[in-house]
Amino acid sequence: MKKLFKVACILLSVFLLIPLTGCNEKTPSASPSAENGTTDKPTSTIKTSPTPAPTLAPETNLTQYKKFLDKAARGEDIVIAYLGGSITQGAATSPTSGTGVDGQHYSFSYDSETQSYRALTFNWLQEHYAVRPNQFKQVNAAIGGTPSFLGAYRLPANVLTQKPDFLFVEFAINDNASPAISDKTPYTMFSIYETLQSIVEQTYAVCPDCAIFMPVSAYRKLGGTQQAWEDILKQGLRVTRNYANFAHIPYANCADLFYNDPSVDKNKVFMGDSGAGNTVHPSPYGHSVYAAGIEKAIENIFTNASFDFKPADFTNATKVEMDKLKGMPYRATLVMANDLTFEGATLSSTVYTDFRKDYKKLVSKDAAKTFSFTFKGSAVGMWCDSGTNGYFNVKVDGISVGKWGLNVKRTNTSNFFGFMFFIAKSGLDPAKTHTIELVPDADQSDITNGGKYALEILAVMVDEYSK
C-alpha cells in the first residue's frame, strides 16, 4: 500500500502538472476509530458563509483531490465531512430481522458507525492515506429526511466551520420533491441545480482546496402500483447526476453499482418489508457495495487524475447552462434558537443523539403569542422541531404569504416546500429591513397527535443575512 500511495501522488502530479511535494511513503500507523466530528453548538455566534467566490472552472475541480493527497502525505490534520440525509447518517434495512418482500427470512446485525457507507469510506480513506494515528477526523453532518436546500442552509454552521478537506454531498433521494421544479424552472429556488450549486460555491468560498464527491443513491425497484413513486425517484437521481456531470463534480451512480454489476447480489442490496424506509435504505450488504463503488471512483481519480463525466440528460427538460446558475441560497445563515427572542418562550434542549444533541429550541405553548424576527436579507424561512403542534399564518413584512402547520389536519396553503422547514419568501431586497411572523391561527382544534399547541423553533434561515 505504501507503493500505491506514492504512485498515486506521482501520477496526479504528472497529469495535473503540479509540482510533486510531500509524497513520502506511508509510515506504519494504528487504525484509529472514526471520530464523529462536532459542529457548532447553538451557544456559538451566528454562522454565515462569506460571499462565495466565482465557481472554479469545471476542469479544475479534480485538482483538489491532488491537494488532498499532498496534505495527507505531509501528515497534516485531515477533515472528512459528510452532508446528506438518512443514508449518509447510516440508516439501513429495518428491522434487522424479518421477512422480506421476496418472502425470504433475513437476519443481520448492524452498526452504522462501522458498517454504513459513511463509516466504510472514512475508514478506507484513513487506512490508505493517513500517515499517522488520529490524523483523520470525521464530521457526520447528515440529517435524515432533509433535502439539499436545507443542506445548503446548514452547510456554513454544520460543515464549513470544521474546514473540510474532503466533502461528501448526498441528497439525491431526499430531493424527490424537486425534480419537476428542476426540469421546468432550473434557475429558481428549490431547483436541485441551484441548491447543489449553492453547496459547491459556498464550500469553495471557505475551503477552495476541498475535494467534493457526490454519491447518487439508489432505490429498490418498485413498479406496479408504485411506478409513479419510482418515476419521481428516478427523475431526482437523473437531475443530480446531470448537475454532477456538467459541474464536473465526481460522483458514484449507485443504481449502476446495485443493478448493473454482475458481481453484486441484486436481491440483497435492499431487504426488509415494503415500508418506505426499506425502499431507499440499503441493507448492510448494500452499504458495503455503495462504499466499494465510491472508493473505486476516488482511487481512480487519485491514480489517473480523471473521471468519466457523461453528457447531461435533458430529455423532456429545460437545458441548463452552467453560467446561468446563481447558487441559491447565495450566502446562507442559520440564526439559531439561542440567538432569537420570543416573549414567554423557553429555551429547551432537543432530544437528538446526533450532532444536533447540543442544539437548543425555543418553545412557546401560548397560542396567543406571535413569533417575530427582524432582519436584513434576500430570503427567509423557518426550521422548526417535530414537537410543533399547530397551524400558523406566515407573514413577511406584514403581508400573509400563506398558512403552515405541523401535526394538524389542515394542509399548507402555500408551497413552502418543507415539513419542519420552509422558505416563506425570497426575492427580498437585502439592503432593507424585513420581518417574518408566525401568527397562531385562532382555531387549533385539529391537532392530530393528541398533543397540545406548541411552537418549537430551531432556527430562522436567512439568505444574505445582516442585522
Image (tube, helix red, strand yellow):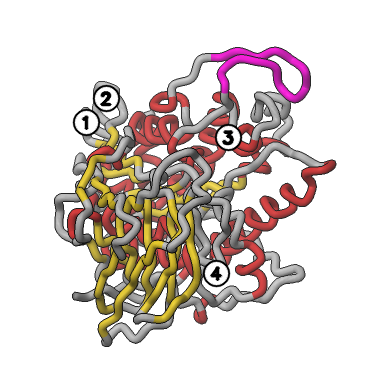
Q: Indicate whether residue 154 is drawn in magenta.
A: no
Q: Describe residue 376's horizontal placement relative to residue 3 as left or right.
A: left
- The answer to whether the residues at label 1 and label 3 have Cβ atoms under 8 Å apart is no
Residue 391 in the image: x percent, y percent?
46, 58
Q: Indicate whether residue 103 is drawn in magenta.
A: yes
Q: Secondary structure at mark 3?
A: loop
Q: Which residues are magenta?
A: 95-108
Q: Earlier in the sequence, mark 2 or mark 4?
A: 2
In the image, farthest residue toward the right: 224
List the residue tagged with mark 2: 32
- Amino acid type at circle 4 is Ser
List the residue tagged with mark 3: 281
- Amino acid type at circle 2 is Pro
Q: Residue at x 61, y 54 (%)?
A: 176
Residue 386: give its label: none
Q: CA distance from mark 4 to mark 1?
A: 49 Å
Q: Earlier in the sequence, mark 2 or mark 3?
A: 2
List the residue tagged with mark 4: 414
Q: Secondary structure at mark 2?
A: loop
Mark 2: few/some/many CA within 10 Å (<14, 14-19, 20+): some
Q: Secondary structure at mark 1?
A: loop
